[in-house]
Amino acid sequence: GRAIVLGLVPLLAVAGMAIVGHWVASFLAAVYLPEASVVLLCKLTMLSDTLFGLLGMLAIERFGIYAHWIMSTPPPGTMALVEEWKRNGLWLPGEDFVPGQDGFTGFGALFSVYVDISYSHSVELMALSAVPIIMFMWARYGIRAKYALAILFVCVSHPLLDMVFHDANFLMGNRAKTRVSFNLWQITWLGPVLFIVEVLMAYVPYRMWLRTKQPITQDKNTEEEIAKWKGLFWQIAITHNMVSWYIVSPAIQWAFYNLAPQPTFAFGADNFWSCALLAITVWSWSIALYPLYRLEALLVPAAEDWKTDKTNHDLEAPSYMKLAE
């Protein structure tokens, strides 16, 4: 188990973390799969956002801002993008609206863009992406079929969960096809509620996962280290990951469109520098997983006899943790 953590963290060091609600799939999978690395599973839940950062800078996936709370009309870059999508069959009448159509005056504060993320946030591509990861894990660590299914599950969980908050697709390649969204992030006043809901979505299964673990050794130093990394994990997850999206991101949008010259600094209006800034931010969210990695290294699956044998101060991991000799 710990060998998998050590082996996969360098391999996936660039994987990006986004909003913490996606970790619900990772912690739940780890509860029912004791040998799984929860750090690996958490990274894989955010593979969609990692790819979005890359595909955005390559202009394969694109977005254009139209935020009703800071502008009356979209920037020229956004309107050019809309017209291009119309010409290329990427516009969905009845679901996509131009400014003024049926009273449409722009998007909400948490997801204020027309967007094409039909590759990175498609169930199809995430399922396909899971295949080489599963093959590597099987060849290197001899993982069981259940572990393979867990990897597939956490990979596809991201676009499936995102359909509640913003646009995501079942099939890849065309934003106008198989797109689903319940658009909770378009309801600006729901922001504080969704902030709390997302934290709980991660924290409750995290606590369930912790109950399946015990310290690798029973001594004061280990207990202090566990407490330190627990606290740092949630401190970064909330103050960096969550705050950067729910508070800092809207503030940056407001600052650009109220303080910077336009259209020179049209943030989010289908330009490379906006994509690069967003990609760096998304990838930086992985920092939250380093404390979790250190925490996981201090834990082993709870043995059945641990409840009665309190004198065992050097309990080794059960045999099912040893996936490959």
Image: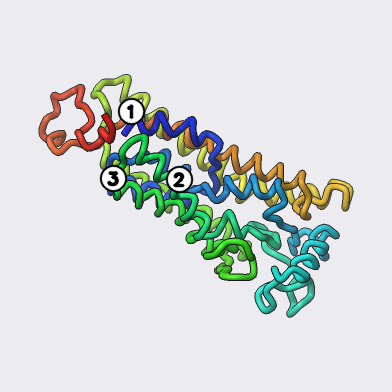
| Mark 1 → mark 3, Cα distance in angstroms | 23 Å
Relative height, residue 216 to residue 79 (above, below): above
Q: Amino acid at mark 1?
A: Leu
Please give the residue where the numbered disc 3 appears in the rendered image. 144
Residue 154, percent across and down? 42, 51
Contact between marks 1 and 3 (CB within 8 A): the answer is: no
Helix, strand or loop at label 3? It is loop
Relative height, residue 307 to residue 314 (above, below): below
Upstream in sequence: badge 1 or badge 2: 2
Closer to the observer: label 1 or label 2?
Answer: 2
Residue 55, percent across and down? 65, 49
| Mark 1 → mark 2, Cα distance in angstroms | 29 Å
Q: Tell me if 115 is positioned left or right of 36 in this view.
A: right
Q: Tell me if 126 is positioned left or right of 94 in this view.
A: left
Please give the residue where the numbered disc 1 appears in the rendered image. 298
Q: Tell me if 18 is positioned left or right of 104 in this view.
A: left
Colouring? rainbow
Q: The N terminus appears in which quarter of the rendering? A: top left
Tell me if I can see residue 241 in this picture.
yes
Please give the residue where the numbered disc 2 appears in the rendered image. 132
Relative height, residue 95 to residue 190 (above, below): below
| Mark 2 → mark 3, Cα distance in angstroms | 15 Å
Instruction: Quadrant for residue 243, please give it.
Output: top right
